[in-house]
Image (cartoon, rainbow, N blue to C red):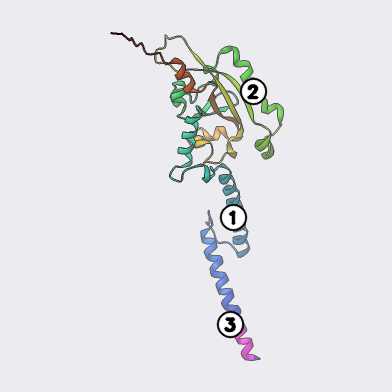
Amino acid sequence: DKAKRVSRNKSEKKRRDQFNVLIKELGSMLPGNARKMDKSTVLQKSIDFLRKHKEITAQSDASEIRQDWKPTFLSNEEFTQLMLEALDGFFLAIMTDGNIIYVSESITPLLEHLPSDLVDQSVFNFIPEGEHSEIYKILSSHLLESDSLTPEYLKSKNQLEFCCHMLRGTIDPKEQPTYEYVKFIGNFKCLNHVPNSAHNGFEGTIQRSHRPSYEEKVCFVATVRLATPQFIKEMCTVEEPNEEFTSR
């Protein structure tokens, strides 16, 4: 009996020592570990970290493009850019007061604007004055729908589609302004709820100095497409060749 008890005590001590080593290693891996923690605190913080990591992973998976839609040699951003170009579209992110915070590069071949021409400008500067009131109502519509932007509201109830005219870019400021009829399809996002990889990287383009003022604010993130596809317009503007035939 004494020999069994000694053997059992040795086994228990070995397990305790292994457990303590694992707890110590786990504690050293936790972020912000500036002080010594007891075992229960280490385990609780580990659970909290894993739970948060799971939520972030779920958000990232939701924004990932399905692999059977995309060649493996293209990144999500490259594939999204190609799709936007094929659809004659671009991404636009607008604060509810009309301030533009992101425009994708695919706007340039469509409306002849550089993204830098629009960022930090009001969208109303690029829309005919007669359409301002309607667009303002649309950008304010989330306030009428919900007192607070709950996750359920953000996911399912706030998709909007509308059409308007947008100003085309021009090199000559004296040139008469021309507008393109476009269609917006998008929804409202709370800026602190947007995953970093979402929407072709628009979150990453917001200057860090601006981010504190954007906390808890809402923006409208949309895909903007030409109402008339680009290739149809190009076909309509092709001139018939002037060919002459002579007979002998």
Disc 3 or 1, which lies upstream in sequence? 3
Q: Residue furthest front?
A: 248
Give the residue number, with chain letter if any, for mark 1: 50
Numbered disc 1: secondary structure: helix
Q: Residue 128, how many percent across, how many down?
A: 55, 13
Q: Residue at x 54, y 58 (%)?
A: 35
Quadrant of the image for the C terminus?
top left
Gap between marks 2 and 3, in whole Å? Answer: 73 Å
Gap between marks 3 and 1, in whole Å? Answer: 33 Å
Q: Main secondary structure of the magenta part?
A: helix
In the rendered view, would you say 98 is above or below 205? Answer: above
Numbered disc 2: secondary structure: helix
Q: Residue at x 64, y 17 (%)?
A: 134
Please indicate, yes or no, whether residue 72 appears anywhere in the rendered image: yes
In the rendered view, would you say 231 is above or below 218? Answer: above
Mark nearer the viewer, 1 or 2: 2
Q: Residues within 10 Å of mark 1 (few under 14, many from 20)?
A: few
149 vs 25, left or right, is right
Q: Is residue 170 part of the magenta span, yes or no?
A: no
Give the residue number, with chain letter if any, for mark 3: 10
Q: Residue flagged by tag 1: what amino acid is it?
A: Leu
Give the residue number, with chain letter if any, for mark 2: 138
User: Which corner quadrant of the image does residue 22 belong to?
Assistant: bottom right
Mark nearer the viewer, 2 or 3: 2
Dot label at residue 194: none
Numbered disc 3: secondary structure: helix
In the rendered view, would you say 224 is above or below 18? Answer: above
Disc 2 or 3, which lies upstream in sequence? 3
Q: Residue 245, how many percent across, how many down?
A: 33, 10
